[in-house]
Amino acid sequence: MINFNIPPFLGNETEYIKRAVMNKKICGDGEFTKKCNSWIEQNTGTYKALLTTSCTHALEMAAILSEIQPGDEVIMPSYTFVSTADAFVMKGAKIVFVDIRPDTMNINENLIEDAINERTRAIVPVHYAGVSCEMDKIMEIAKKYKLIVVEDAAQGVKSLYKGRSLGTIGDYGCYSFHETKNYSMGEGGALLINNSDKIEKAEIIREKGTNRSKFFRGQIDKYTWVDYGSSYLPSDINAAYLWAQLENSDKINDYRLNVWNTYYNGLSDIKEITLPVVPEACTHNAHMFYIKTKDLQERTDLIKYLKENDIQAVFHYIPLHSSPAGKKYGYFHGEDIYTTKESERLLRLPLYYGISEKDVKTVINTIKEFYK
């Protein structure tokens, strides 16, 4: 069986987890949490990175920091994971879905402005497959209407837009380190704060509404409850697992890019499918490789054929606006020209650190056999 995904394991994870245990500090903000935070800051240029228990929680923190209030509206694509919307729904916001671009599956930047009204508070671009949205245009619109931009860069660690790390262009960026991502801690994420004025507030929110972070830095002699917050700190054991991968991030990135390029070159002569598009301004991280079939039926048939040949391939999101919660908490602005149609064509192929060249070529050849 060729698995769709196997979580990355470099070899030092076990040693680092043991060290975290021996440090007798396995709760949040231990040695490895600090290493991971520093790595993100140094490799992206963000003012402050805070490791969180998930990307969902990073998005929730961003929603709180953005001061989203009941009745506010937040613009985002419908083709995304539920967490993108959930974080803002929990603050009482109405979600406004707009159509995507068929080339990158990202939000269509040219449709955002028409969806803005007096209740609009934020734009949440989602960098699908680690390929950036058109951020210059999005930031231009945000500046014009004084809107907050929260980048859902769950899939975008080590991806760039015009040389800038995804997650550092808007007001806040959110990363995922779930087991399906390029770098994993099982469950986990990170909030990137791109305004130094918001760092102290973020630390308070993350530490259950207390000024505990300042206490541990020796800035105050005791800590207390000062504001709203929750517990968004991951265990240092999880961070220890992640650190083994971050310190080898180039190795993982190069491996995945090689697999991605092998797929692209190997499938490029099949006229019946559409391959991913990476715009010139974008440097991607090979988070996933997908193809697009003619329609939903063909995709269903191809998934079945691959499964019969011991290959796991999966489709992705069901558009949020068509879900029960999407209808309850949001609405689609404009016409759904591409969101549903393109989502029904998209099929993700096995791609993970460690997948063999033999297995990749088996997937390619099996798809070719299907189309013969």
Image (cartoon, rainbow, N blue to C red):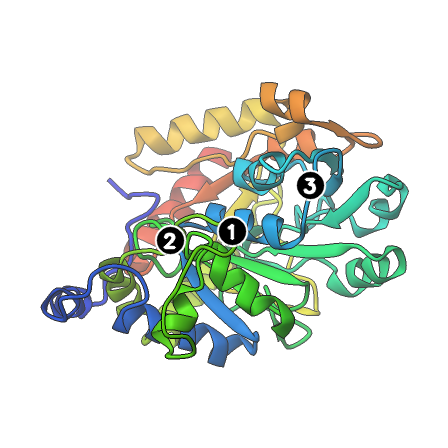
Q: Is residue 14 above or below residue 60?
A: below
Residue nearer the viewer, 239 or 306? 239
Three-letter amino acid code at the position of disc 1: Leu
On the image, the x and y values in percent for residue 33 come to 33, 68
| Residue 372 visible in the picture | no
The 10 Å Cα crowd at callout 3, few under 14, some 14 to 19, many 20 or more, is many
Q: Quadrant of the N terminus?
A: top left
Residue displayed at 44% across by 58% down: 210
Q: Please, what secondary structure does the residue beneath circle 3 have?
A: strand
Mark 1–mark 2 Cα distance, whole angstroms, equals: 34 Å
Asked whether the beta carbons under mark 1 and mark 3 sit within 8 Å of each other, the answer is: no
Residue tagged 2:
188
Mark carried by residue 267: 1
Residue tagged 3:
77
Residue nearer the viewer, 236 or 81? 236
Three-letter amino acid code at the position of disc 2: Gly
